[in-house]
Image: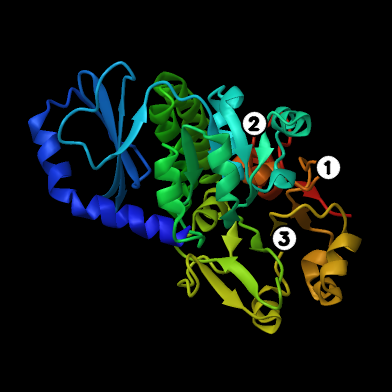
Amino acid sequence: MKNLFIILLLLVAGCKSNIENNETAFNVIETLKPRYAKGFEVLYYTEFKVVNVKSNDKVTTQYIIYSLQNACPKGFENAIKITDSIEDVVLLSTSQVAAVTLLNKTAKIAGVANSKMIFNEQVNQLITSGEIQDVGADYEPNIDKVVRIKPSLLFTDGEYTTQGAVLGKLSLADISVVNCQDYKETTPLARAEWIRFYGAIFNEQKLADSIFATVEQNYLYLKNKVNTTTQKPTIFCNYPYLGIWYLPAKGNYTTALFEDAGANYIWSNDLPNNGLNVSLNFEQVLKRAKTANMWILFSGEKNLKELTLKDEKLAIFDAFKNKKIFSASLRVSAGGGIDYWETGIYRPDWVLSDLTNIFHPEVNDLLIQTHFFNALN
């Protein structure tokens, strides 16, 4: 929601001096400084806490979380207010569904966007029963429907364009907007650490810290094991969409994931020309990736035939001929929801385990089961 996001930024910019003064007017008793994520921090005061969302080390959005029994502390009038008694929430991203369910807050989900793209079985059952409502597309949700649901919070990533009157409608309905910026992080652990952001919002900090500690321990163990290998398979990923092949570039968390899994990803050092990606045509990719050893897909194709239905020319690549293509098709819902884009965001240790088993099966002694990826035949 670009309009919504811009308005929120202007509001916060206007009270920036207040933000700085607040941190000296009250005594901070504890600070959560993420070990990997750069986009947030949590400040704990005696009777409330403040969550700062940051960009380039500057606070861009501030949330104050306080007891419903108390008034909002003075000096934070312009911060986005959240009480510690959250009733219902609306989620516009599948990764948000994963975060909320991991924190055992499924019962608080009252609405979701793109309901058919959700993998979580329990959430799908609640959608079918009508307990969770579909609020439309993530890029343009039905705000009137959101207002009728009247959730305590609407979670978004703040990047989509919608009606200019959105903020006013939500404000009048007393619905606070939470902009989640995890996708801007540049490593898998940094993105996964945003579970601690949700932990702060939902007052489940200990659980969130425990989840992330497990993820971090497993991830670093596998990463260090992979570092002992000398042979790295050459890989590439994805396929063209409307004639354009989008590939993660330098600084993209997927690029970091491939490196940590011990792969020689062809575009690992290419500078992005489209967000954190490079946008290329078929011929440009073919020139560099035709002889690549392996091909990774983050989509749900289950066999080679399904892939050629996208474009027959994809069969030209050696990885296709050698059946060395792996897709995130192992956990796909009937509606097409891919769990890699849901649980995989907050369990990159599972993703790394899968990829390590593909690239270097000899070093993965943590593998209990394959979580997301499947070989295409």
Q: Residue furthest top?
A: 69
x and y, in percent, of residue 24 in the image = 8, 34
Q: Earlier in the sequence, mark 1 or mark 3?
A: 3
Q: Residue at x 30, y 49 (%)?
A: 54
**Please, what is the three-letter code of the amino acid marked with disc 2?**
Asp
Q: Is residue 193 left or right of residue 108?
A: left
Image spot of residue 151 (x, y percent): 51, 33
Residue type at mark 3 is: Met
Secondary structure type for disc 2: loop
Viewer-side label of 3, 2: 3
Q: Is residue 350 above or below residue 358?
A: above
Tell me the residue at 49%/40% (across/down): 154
The residue beneath circle 1 is: 334
Q: Nearer the viewer, mark 1 or mark 3?
A: 1
26 left or right of 158 in image: left
Tell me the number on the disc at residue 367.
none
User: In the image, 177: left or right of 151?
Assistant: left
Q: Position of residue 252 (x, y in %)?
A: 49, 59
Q: CA distance from mark 1 to mark 3?
A: 28 Å
Residue type highlighted by circle 1: Ala
Query: For mark 2, what is the residue?
Result: 365
Kindly report the distance in space between the C-alpha atoms of the residues bearing marks 3 and 2. Answer: 22 Å
